[in-house]
Each structure stands twice: as structure tokens, then as C-alpha cells.
Amino acid sequence: MNTLIYKANILVEALPYIQKLRGKTIVIKYGGNAMVDEGITKTIMQDITLLKYVGVNPVVVHGGGPKISETLDVMNIKSEFYKGLRITNKDAIDVVQMVLAGSINKDIVSQINCLGGKAIGLCGKDGNLILAEKKKNIENVDLGYVGEIKKINSKMIELLAQDEYIPVIAPIGTDSEGQSYNINADTAAGEIAAALKAEKLIFLTDIDGIYLDPKEPNSLLSVISIGEIYELMDKGIISGGMIPKVLGCIKALQQGVNRTHILNGTIPHPILLEIFTDKGIGTMVVKEETNNGL
């Protein structure tokens, strides 16, 4: 009986959060190392499906870096990165599009649908959803077919999300001539959340959040401001693949998204633990100043 009462209390704890978020949009960036464990993946798909059933409108933006790298290796195409962005030559862009818009996108759609959701797979080329142009060289490094987002045509996403569907978006952009571009999934998630004026933007990654000292497990920051992010970037504490995530958070916050979060996507049910519990997990990025004392 005590176990049943405990479970009931968990549901009651979630009630005010369900009430607050009902009818609101939450953009979830899912990908990379959060995709590796099939058991964890299933719990994330369950989280997303449950959100829809309680009246929240989830929009999924996914990456797939490890799978892309694996496929490139099989095809003897070298994987190179610069400041967290994949250098994408002409051969690589075809593989990136195939893996993201084909294999991974449809796998996610299938998993959600098998749980009773109604997911629809999209890529940025569908309906010119993600209009892009070639990203300018960074410190004289040519990133190849890596795109800079010019515009998000959000109407199609809104129509689907506000109905009974769960949009699942692969971050492939297109220009006016139909050229495909590899868009960093973290950047795309931030831009999509901003265009949708989402209530929340959630990044699922393979660490617990942002650390003041990456070597010290107890230095996890539960909340951090935009100003503090720039300070930690200047110090080199925030670096590599975390940079597009925090910049995505900043973009979203500056464009009207209420809250942004960086969570560990390698633990079971990370989304539910963050948004439907009093304590939450991970790091929340906010516009206002904090008491971190950085």
C-alpha cells in the first residue's frame, strides 16, 4: 500500500506543472550520445509521448553525430570538427542527409508511433522549413556544406504540433536553389524554439549539465545566466560541443522562450524528471542574473 501511495504522490506532484504547461510548446533536442542506449532511448520516447497525452505540444529536433561518423567511417570519408561543428564536404553532405533525414528520423518516428503517439518526420527541406546559406569561414577554416540558418518557416510545425501530431525534425537546411546544408542540431533547436515562441527548450546531452569546474562533480550549476555563460566561454570552461547548446539557449531566450534546460539524456526519463518534479535535474539557463558569484 505504501508503494501505491508513493506513486500517487508522484502524480500529484506533477499536477501543477501539467496544468501550467497544457497547450504550451516544448522543443526537445535529442541526439548524439543520448541515442546510444536503446533502453534509455525508449524512456525518452515514452516521455515525449506522455507529454502529448497530457496536453503539452512536444517538437523534437534530432541530431545523430555518432551514427553519421560511423557511416562516414564505413565509406572511408574522414570526420573532422571545428569548434563543435562538423566540417562537411560534398561527399559528406550526402551521407549526413541520408543518415539524418532517412535512417534516424524514421527510427524516432517509428518508436513514438509504436508507443501510441502520432509522430511525423520532417527535414528542413520539407516546405522550406529551414532556409539556410553557407556558413562563413571561421578563423579561415572552410566548413564546407555547413549552413547558417536564415529563416525558420514555422507554420507547418505549428499546424502539426497544435493538432494531434508530434513533429520530428532532421536539421538539414536548404537554400533557394535546393542545395542541402548540414545544420548543427543544437543551433537548429534554438532557432526553431525561438520561431515557435516555445515555453521551454530542452537539450539532452551526455553530461548532467554545466559545471563550474568540469573536473569537480559537485560544481554542477543548477541555474546559470546568459552573462555567466559568456564568462565561462571566455575562460574556456564551456567549450567544444557545449558551445552550440548554450548559444542555442541564448538565442531562444532572447527571442521569447521562457526557460531553457541542458539535461543528461543518458538517464531514464530525463524530460519527466525535469519538468514534472519540484527539484528537477540538469542546468537551467535564464536571462536574469543568478547568485552563482562568478
Image (cartoon, grey):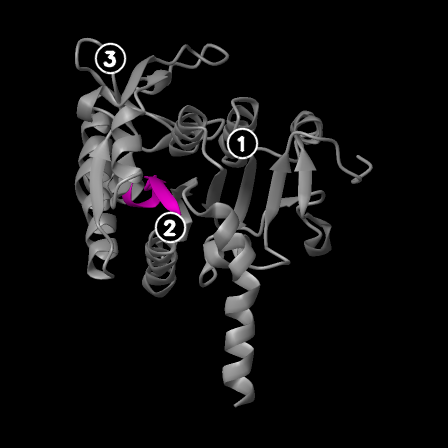
Q: Where does label 1 land, which residue?
A: 249
Nearer to us: label 3 or label 1 = 1
Say which element carries label 3: loop
Asked if 75 appears above or below 278 in the picture, the reply is above
Sequence-wise first label, 2 or 3: 2
Q: Earlier in the sequence, mark 1 or mark 2?
A: 2
The residues tagged by marks 2 and 3 sit, at their Cα atoms, a distance apart of: 35 Å
Q: Residue at (55%, 79%) from the top-left corner?
A: 6
Which numbered mark, 1 or 2, is in the foreground of this view?
A: 2
Name the image quarter holding the C terminus: top right
203 or 24: nearer the eye? Answer: 24
Q: CA distance from mark 1 to mark 2?
A: 24 Å
Q: Position of residue 92 (x, y in %)?
A: 24, 28
Is residue 58 shown in magenta? yes
Magenta-span inclusion, residue 62 = yes
Q: Which residue is mark 2?
A: 55
Let me know if residue 264 appears in the view. Answer: no
Magenta segment range?
Answer: 55-68
Any mark on residue 175, and which? Answer: 3
- Taking the image as shown, residue 45 lies to the left or right of residue 175, namely right
Residue 202 appears anywhere in the view: yes
- Outermost bottom residue: 1
Crowd rating for badge 1 (residues with CA inside 10 Å; few <14, some 14–19, many 20+): many
Residue type for callout 1: Cys
Q: Position of residue 248 (x, y in %)?
A: 50, 29
Q: Residue at x 18, y 28 (%)?
A: 94
- Given residues 49 and 222, the one toward you in this image is 49
